Image (cartoon, helix red, strand yellow):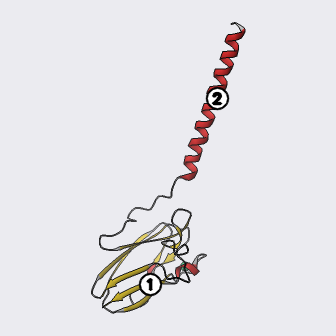
Amino acid sequence: MGQNRKILLGIIIVAIVGAASVAGLYLFSLGKTETVSLPAGCVKPSNGFLVIASDDATYGTGYNNSKGHGAPNNPWPLITVTQGTNVTITVCNIDVQAHSFNIIYYLPGAANTIAPGQVQTFSFMANVTGSFVIFCEVPCSIHPFMEDGLLEVTA
Ligand SMILES: [Cu+2]
């Protein structure tokens, strides 16, 4: 093998190794930016509402990123319905800790606790008008952002 061929072979090997490194870094970065997948059943019900409880770079912190929407100073999430509506709300907990989904008068009690990775759907008839606080009653690390949602039932 002549000297020129050896140099050419060296250049080709360097090019192949370099390309493989770039491809590897690219695939690694794809893995790093992969979005969190939602659990089965975590879909907005037809004519209803979807609430995602999370503490996550993709979905934010609180209920539907209530932290990013100014909670606890600004109520979030806001759900407005007219009196007589049969309200359906699907709540997904994609956080690593348990949360609950409670609404004053309409969804009281500890039965609304949702384990990590679980999805629950709540339904009720909005028969009484007014403003009703939506909150989590499970003590959690993101609690301040999960205490001031609002259900508005208008006449
Ligand atoms: Cu909580």
What amino acid is found at the position of numbered circle 1 in the picture? Answer: Leu
The residue closer to the viewer here, 3 or 94, is: 3
What is the number of callouts on the image? 2
The residue sitting at the right extreme is 3
Quadrant of the rendered structure where residue 96 is? bottom right
Q: Position of residue 53 (x, y in %)?
A: 49, 71
User: Which image quadrant is residue 43 in?
Assistant: bottom left
Looking at the image, residue 126 sits to the left or right of residue 16; the answer is left
**Residue 22, placed above or below residue 42:** above
Looking at the image, residue 20 lies above or below residue 61: above
Q: Which residue lies furthest to the top in this view?
A: 2
| Residue that appears at 51% across and 68% down | 116
- Ligand 1's quadrant is bottom right
Residue 38 position within the rendered picture, expressed as x and y whole percent measured from the top left = 45, 61
Q: Residue at x 52, y 52 (%)?
A: 34
In the rendered image, residue 16, in percent from the top left (x then y), is placed at 61, 26
Q: Distance between the residues labelled 2 and 1?
A: 58 Å
Q: How crowded is mark 2: few (under 14 residues within 10 Å), some or many (20 or more)?
A: few
Question: Residue at coordinates 63% horizontally, 35% vertically from top-left?
Answer: 21
On screen, residue 114 versus residue 129, left or right, reads right
Mark 1 falls on what kind of element?
strand
User: Where residue 134 sits in the image (x, y, percent)?
Assistant: 46, 84
Q: Residue 17 carries which label?
A: 2
- On the image, numbered disc 1 is attached to which residue? 150
Of the numbered discs 2 and 1, the one sitting upstream in the chain is 2
In the rendered view of the protein, which quadrant contains the N terminus?
Answer: top right
Residue 94 vs 148, above or below: the answer is above
Disc 2, SS:
helix
Q: In this view, does 149 lie to the left or right of 123?
A: right
Circle 2: residue type: Val
